[in-house]
Amino acid sequence: MCHTGINTSRLLFRNIIMLLICTTAAGVIRAQNNSNNLTLTAINTGFTLNNVSAIETQQINPNAFQIVVNSRSSNLFSVRARVSASTSSTGTPFPASMLSLRCNSTSPPVTANTNTITLSNTDQLLQQINSTKNNVTFNYDLLLDPVGYNYAPGNYNLTILFTMTQP
Amino acid sequence: MIMKNSRLYIVLLSLVSTKGMGQSFNGTINPVISIQSVMAVSITNNASSTINFTNAQYASGYTISNFNTFNIKSNQPWRLSVSAATPNFSASGSYASNNMPASVIGVVKSGQSPFKQLSSTDQVLATGNRGNAGISGNSFNMDLMANPGYAYGPGIYTLTIVYTLSAQ
């Protein structure tokens, strides 16, 4: 009886120690997660179309927003984007494909994709970066295709969702 | 028993560790596109705006088909109105009458009737739907008729015609 009681105490003690180790390990990993993040800063993401030229030609907001990526757990990361919501005051939502994104610069300089990427409702790959720099700012232009005369006057609201993934 | 516990902890640690791999991080921006009312009309003169009357034209009036061509672009349903800038023509010449009214001029969208006699009050010349000049009804011609009869003296008469494009 006495022998079994000692074993139970040892087992309990061992369990507590192992749980502490697991908790500490999880805490370390969580801290590492905190140093990996994606931050979006909108600078000039709105468009006002109030004349014939604005309606009929492509509109470009240079440096419309910034994406800041902290990727400390891996040098390899990718950034994707999609339109996750589209609503309007007229009841007719804007199609995602009316918007495009174009990276015009990065800080610090890294080899980045500067092609114009047309958005859709599914993820589009913007960047696939392999760099020793673990804190990169991407400056993006926002492009709006010619709207034409088929959309009634009103406000059209879109949400663009950006996702940074690491292998 | 100890081995069993160790396996359990290894599995637990592995599960926790894999949280650090294959992660994704999200952020959003919310562009707003504000489309305001945009309308435009272009007018082409297909004939001279100077009309010289002969005897025959005094008797029955002078009609010019397709006098103007209109091309309309609008992002909302539209109407085009027409009026005279003044109730009467301005007149010059020794025998000219100062009271020739704007109603001497009548206009109508080509293919329709009757002619609308002009006044200083807006009258609807045509209506149409949202779209550019390529859609049906947004590009059309207008006929013009001038019929002063014999009630006014010889002279040079001038009238300004005003076209107004507005939302329905």
Image: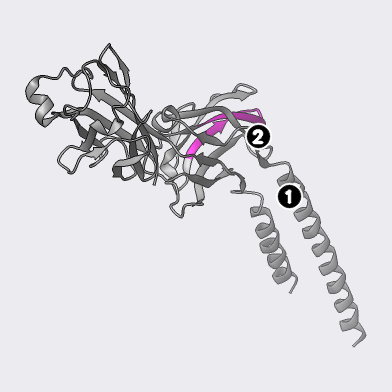
Q: Secondary structure at mark 2?
A: strand
**Near-viewer residue (B136 or A15):** B136
Q: Quadrant of the N terminus of chain B?
A: bottom right
Looking at the rendering, the stretch of residues picked out in magenta corresponds to A125-142
The percent position of residue A57, horizontal first and vertical second, equals 40, 28
Direction right: furthest residue: A2
Name which residue type carries label 2.
Val
- Tell me if A137 is positioned left or right of B73 in this view: right
Which one is in front, A24 or B86?
A: B86
Residue A10, percent from left and from top: 87, 72
Instruction: State the image quarter where residue A13 is shown.
Output: bottom right
Which subunit holds the residue at mark 2?
A
- Point out residue A70 in the picture as x, y percentages from the top left corner: 68, 36
Chain letter belonging to callout 1:
A
From the image, tell me which residue sits under label 2: A68
- Disc 1 marks a residue whose amino acid type is Ile
Q: What residue do we see at 65% from left, 59% from top? A: B15
Residue B117 in magenta? Answer: no
Q: Do badges 2 and 1 share one subunit?
A: yes
Q: Residues within 10 Å of mark 1 (few under 14, many from 20)?
A: some
Instruction: Choose top left, top right, bottom left or bottom right for residue A56.
Output: top left
The residue beneath circle 1 is A29
Q: Tell me the number on the disc at residue B17.
A: none
The answer to whether residue B163 is seen in the rendering is yes
Q: Main secondary structure of the magenta part?
A: strand
Which label's residue is closer to the chain start, 2 or 1? 1
**Any part of residue A167 in sight:** no
Residue B58 coordinates in the image, percent (x, y): 12, 25
In the rendered view, tell whether residue B10 sits above or below residue A122.
Answer: below
